[in-house]
Image (spheres, rainbow, N blue to C red):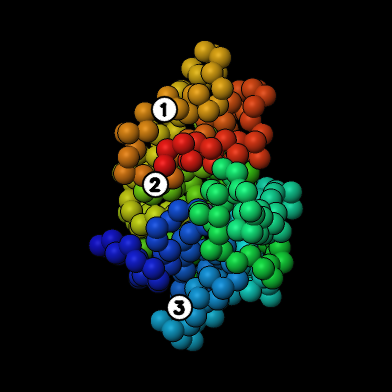
Amino acid sequence: MTMPPYTKGLHRVGTHTYAYLQPDGSWGLSNSGLVVDEGEGLLVDTLFTLALTEELRSAIAARLPGVEITTVVNTHDDGDHTFGNQLFADRTIIGSAAMAAHLAASPSADYFRALIERAVGGEAPGALETFVRERMGSFDLSGIEMTPPNSTFAGRREVGVGRQRVHLIQVGPAHTEGDVLVEVPADGVLFTGDILFAGSHPVIHSGPVGRWIEACELIEGMAVETVVPGHGPVTGKPAVRRLRGYLERVAEHAERGLRAGLSVSEAAGRFPLEEYADWTDPERIVLNIGAVYRELGAEDGDFAELFVQTAEFWAGRR
Ligand SMILES: [Zn+2]
C-alpha cells in the first residue's frame, strides 16, 4: 500500500480502512480512522470540536454513501479525540475502563473553552494566553457535552465490523491513563491514537514513559505495515522506532537533569532539540521532561504549572 498524501480529508489505506487526516497535526489537529464492511462503519476517535466532527461525518457520507457508523472507539481521553463523541451518543462508544474513568477527571471542554476565551479576549496577555491564542485560538469548543464511552473493557477486546475483525489492545497508561491501539489485521493497518505522533514532538500526559516505550516495542513486533498516528501523516514502523528513541532519550535526559538539580525548564533548555528539527511543537519538551520529573517524585511536575512553562519556552524560541 502506498502512503496517501498528507492532505486534509478521508484517505483509503487498506481494503476496509481509511484515515481522516488534519494537517499539520499540531495542537488540536488530530487524525481519525474508519473501518468499513458490509455497510457498517467503525470510527476510530472523534475530533476536537463539533464542527470538525460534523465535517468528518460529512466526508464519510460523501465518499461512502450508505455506510452507517455503528461503533466509535476512543483511543484515549484527550479532547481532540473525544469532544465530538456526542454526535454519536446513540451508538456504541468503546474505550478502556481506565480511559473512561479518567475522562471524568481530566480537563473538560469547559476548561479549554475558558482558557481559549481568556486568551483570545485578554487585554494584557502573558505567555500562556499568547500561546493558547496563537496555537488553539481558532477552535470553537462551544456546545460540547462530555460524552464518555458507554462500553468499556480492560486488556484486549475484539469488535466486529461486518465480517471484519478489529482488535483493540490497551497499552496505557502511557501517553494517557488508558491508551488503546486499534488493529485491522486483514489490512495490516494499525491506528495508534497518540501512542504515535508523526512529525511532531509527542506529549507525555500520564506516563510512565517506560510503558510508552514498551508500547512502541509491541507495535514494532506487530504484523502491520501501515500505521495511522494520532497526529501527522500516515506512516510505518520506522516512525515508531524514532519516537521510541526520543522517549528513551527524554527519560535519560530528565533523570540526569533531576540528579544535577536542574529545574524542568533548565533541563528542557539543554535537550538536543536540533536533532528533531523536522518535528513541530518543540515546546512540548518542557511537558515531557516535567512528566519524567513527576514520575521520579520531583515536586515541580504539576500540569498547569508546566503548561505555563511550556508557553514561556515557546515564547523564548520565537
Ligand atoms: Zn491528540
Say whether disc 1 or disc 2 marks the residue closer to the N-terminus. Answer: 1
Residue at label 1? 271
Q: Quadrant of residue 72?
A: bottom right
Task: Please tell me which of labels 1 and 3 falls first in the chain.
Answer: 3
Q: Identify the residue position indicated by label 3 in the image.
A: 59
Secondary structure of residue under mark 1: loop
Q: Amino acid at mark 1?
A: Phe
The answer to whether residue 36 is seen in the rendering is: yes
Identify residue type, mark 3.
Ala
Give the vertical position of 22 relative to 172 (above or below).
below
Residue 15 drawn at (x, y percent): 35, 70
Q: CA distance from mark 2 to mark 3?
A: 27 Å
179 vs 39, nearest the viewer? 179
| Residue at mark 1 to residue at mark 3: CA–CA distance | 41 Å
Q: Quadrant of the C terminus?
A: top left
Check disc 2 and give the amino acid type: Thr
